[in-house]
Amino acid sequence: MKRWKLCALAVVVLAGAGLGLLYRDLEPSRHFEMKTYPVVATPSAATSTDPPSHSQSLPNDPLAVEASTALASPPPDKPAPPARLNESTAFNALILGLDTTSGQTARTDVILLAHVIPAEKKVNLISVPRDTRVPLPGIGLTKINHAHFMAEMDGGKNAGTEAAIQAVSDLLQIPVHYYVKTNFSGFVTFIDTIGGIDVDIPKDMWLSMTRTPLEAGSRHLDGLTALAFVRERYSLEDGDFGRQTDHMKVMRAVVQKLLAPEKITELPGLLKQAKKELAETNLTDSDLLSLAWLFKGMKGQDIKYMQIPGKSVVAADPLVRSPLWYWEPDKERLKELVRENLH
């Protein structure tokens, strides 16, 4: 009997030691302090705003021209920027959501930049409207969500990823260290895999994608409903800006679900599943665990949510060769916002 007790005690001690090591290695401030951050994009020195040639123009609907030649020549290969040994533990992570399922050329439907400060357990989030007007190399002033579409159509999905990340880096004039890119099917499958999420809906709303109502109150959303929720803007009073706020609600709901007591033992497997369903990411499994831990301990005031300052304009687009609605950034106010919150 004593031997069994000693064995049980040894198991408890070893388990405690294992948890202690896990805490030491994954505690966010320590985990990221010990890392050398990758750098996937840095701001370009300059971006040409010259209008495209005829071969670079698109007919009225860019999504209908996959067979046409989009760019006169593919962009030259360039070596990846060197990794940055972090002077502080802050880093920038970009979340990209594509407006497609799989196997289709896509635009970025969701663009969200997170400035993560593990040592202070704070995150500053800035949402970039997909209609933000930016200069793209060799194209001119167009919507930022065209960056992924045009580059992917010309050079494949990796080129699309690189172009979308670079466009955000150029807009905000900051480096990007990590990225996560997903599409509709990956998002739906992941939400269903974790058993859905619980989200507080402040007002009754209509989900245009599924043509169903969503009543106010605490609602449990499956993958398809969650996708319809994060895509909805037409029934919201503040349109795309309201939609951006809903993105944050879903992010928090996912973290809460992953770190619920009944899910803790499943967490490593769930995160592996997340990486499988997410189209692309350069975050490691331990990075994801540490970030989940970071979000779990955050209170409302620890997450600051911002939107690109600017105004609505209608202007000619060099790709569709007709006027389009844009969100025109206020450059000076944006510089100030970035200086105060993303550095």
Image (cartoon, rainbow, N blue to C red):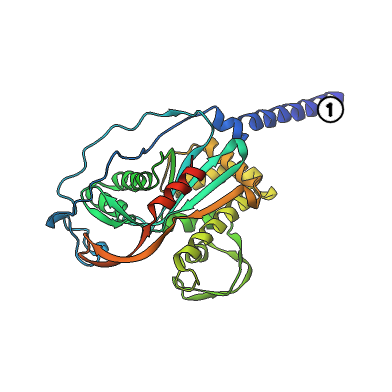
As drawn, is 278 to the left or to the right of 3? Answer: left
Hey, which residue is sitting farthest right in the picture?
A: 1
Residue placed at 38% from the left, 52% from the top? 331
**Tag count:** 1
User: Residue 4 appears at what percent x and percent y?
Assistant: 82, 27
In the figure, 281 relative to 32: above or below? below
Q: Is residue 278 left or right of residue 27?
A: left
Q: Can residue 101 be seen in this view?
A: no
- Which of these two is toward me, 187 or 47? 47
- Element under disc 1: helix
Question: Which quadrant is home to the N terminus?
Answer: top right
Question: Mark 1: few, some, or many residues within 10 Å (few <14, many ≥20)?
Answer: few
State the residue in front, 237 or 190: 237
Q: Which residue is drawn at 21% across and 42% down?
A: 75
List x then y, in percent, for residue 237. 50, 72
Residue 265 found in image quarter: top right
Q: Is residue 111 visible to us here?
A: yes
Residue situated in front as seen by the camera: 71 or 261: 71
- What percent of the width, then of the height, locates residue 192? 54, 58
* x then y, percent, for residue 254: 57, 53
Instruction: Inspect the image, locate mark 1, and give the three-letter code of the amino acid beneath it.
Output: Lys
Task: Please state if 311 lies on the left or on the right of 147 as rendered.
Answer: right
Looking at the image, residue 31 sits to the left or right of residue 109; the answer is right
Q: Name the residue under label 1.
A: 5
Residue farthest to the front, as pictured: 332
